[in-house]
Image (cartoon, helix red, strand yellow):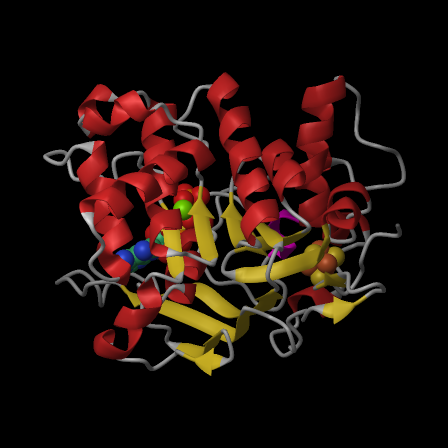
């Protein structure tokens, strides 16, 4: 994909469950296909939201993309370079370009270092600067993230959640990050602070042309942040496209159900007619331990039920693949909803 800063092609990451004495007795698979042949791309100045329920593989995608995990198969192309098999030594010079915002506000903030040391350490990744130059750059970074200079002498434990998040972002800017995987960056913050952090990330994107892979459970925040959205279900992307299309004209039953719960929350209205009724589905326990045949959403799919359980949906040789339904909107379903 020309012009992309990140291209992910058929990325898979499988984990292996440790074997125990009882392993031969239970029927669970020893392999957890946490990410299964996921493909997408990201351009400079672009945000892709990654959504889906807990355990569907979002963080594993983010960590694999940044090569914090080694993919099982597939390719990760960063800035035109295939980094899938790069060694730690080869990755080291790229680390500053690709950074992760972790859900944990304390991640990456050494509790024994003052804010000024945390930031100046990051500034000096580029090479040794004079004390005066470091001070000027630190102040400029604090201005960018709207943090008072007086916080430079604080330790992380003396900061609020929002301030910790800002220091983490300043540190990322100091090293010159261009691709940022933001994994639930607002979930540990108070609602009022969440909006400030979202606005800050958006402003920085405009100023610096940053690319974000934005992982969140909060669909409202995803809608605010993202130009496009990918919806994951049990390791697979089941729908992907421009945010307004995925959120407002979902074609996959799972996406529709996800966003219906948001619409219901906002308006207290029932889901729109002529679309599946969420309450008709048996929303049972289903996970990687009980792999399905064919479409992995079939055991929970209201459309599958309402169509009389069509054989296509559970055909083991016919798992639905993403296909274009217009304007780059892709859906993996044999019977996509009518928009
Ligand atoms: N290091 C690991 N070893 C074994 N299994 C793992 C490991 N990391 C993740 N998993 C499994 O892979 C699956 C995907 O996990 P992942 O953390 O990517 O999900 P997630 O979508 O980020 O969930 P959440 O929204 O709860 O953060 C889960 O079944 C999880 O238990
Ligand atoms: S392929 Fe069938 S089971 Fe899967 S989401 Fe589409 S309608 Fe539902
Ligand atoms: Mg996660």
> Residue 41: x percent and y percent?
60, 67
Q: Is residue 289 magenta?
A: no
Q: Residue at x 21, y 41 (%)?
A: 118
Q: Is residue 300 magenta?
A: yes
> Residue 53: x percent and y percent?
51, 43
Magenta span: 297-301
The chief SS type of the magenta part is helix
In front here: 264 or 189? 189
In the image, residue 27 above or below residue 114: below
In front here: 203 or 4? 203
Q: Quadrant of the N terminus?
A: bottom right
In the image, residue 138 above or below residue 26: above
Instruction: Examine the rendering and report whether any part of residue 55 can be seen.
Output: no
**Quarter residue 90 falls in:** bottom left
Instruction: Looking at this view, name the residue that lies furthest to the left.
Output: 112
> Residue 268: x percent and y percent?
74, 17
> Residue 31: x percent and y percent?
34, 68
123 horizontally vs 241: left or right:
left
């Amino acid at each position: 994909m020309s012009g992309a800063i990140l291209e992910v092609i058929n990325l898979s990451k499988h984990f292996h469950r440790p074997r125990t004495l009882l392993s031969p007795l239970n029927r669970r698979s020893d392999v957890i296909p946490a990410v299964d042949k996921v493909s997408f791309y990201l351009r400079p100045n672009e945000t892709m939201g990654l959504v889906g329920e807990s355990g569907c593989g979002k963080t594993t995608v983010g960590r694999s993309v940044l090569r914090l995990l080694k993919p099982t198969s597939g390719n990760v192309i960063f800035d035109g370079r295939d980094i899938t098999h790069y060694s730690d030594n080869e990755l080291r010079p790229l680390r500053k370009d690709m950074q992760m915002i972790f859900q944990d506000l304390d991640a990456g903030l050494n509790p024994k270092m003052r804010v000024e040391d945390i930031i100046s350490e990051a500034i000096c990744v580029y090479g040794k600067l004079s004390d005066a130059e470091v001070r000027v750059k630190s102040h400029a970074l604090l201005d960018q993230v709207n943090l008072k200079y007086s916080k430079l002498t604080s330790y992380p434990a003396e900061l609020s959640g929002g301030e910790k998040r800002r220091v983490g972002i300043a540190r990322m800017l100091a090293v010159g990050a261009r691709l940022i995987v933001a994994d639930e960056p607002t979930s540990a913050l108070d609602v009022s602070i969440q909006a400030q952090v979202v606005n800050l990330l958006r402003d920085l994107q405009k100023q610096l042309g940053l690319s974000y892979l934005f992982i969140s459970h909060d669909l409202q925040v995803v809608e605010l942040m993202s130009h496009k959205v990918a919806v994951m279900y049990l390791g697979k992307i089941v729908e992907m496209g421009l945010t307004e299309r995925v959120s407002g004209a979902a074609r996959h039953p799972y996406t529709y159900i996800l966003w219906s719960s948001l619409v219901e929350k906002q308006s207290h209205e029932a889901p729109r007619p002529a679309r599946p009724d969420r309450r008709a589905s048996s929303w049972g326990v289903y996970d990687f331990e009980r792999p399905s045949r064919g479409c992995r959403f079939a055991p929970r799919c209201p459309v599958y039920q309402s169509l009389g359980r069509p054989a296509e949906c559970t055909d083991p040789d016919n798992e639905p693949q993403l296909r274009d339904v217009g304007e780059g909107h892709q859906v993996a379903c044999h019977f996509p909803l009518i928009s």
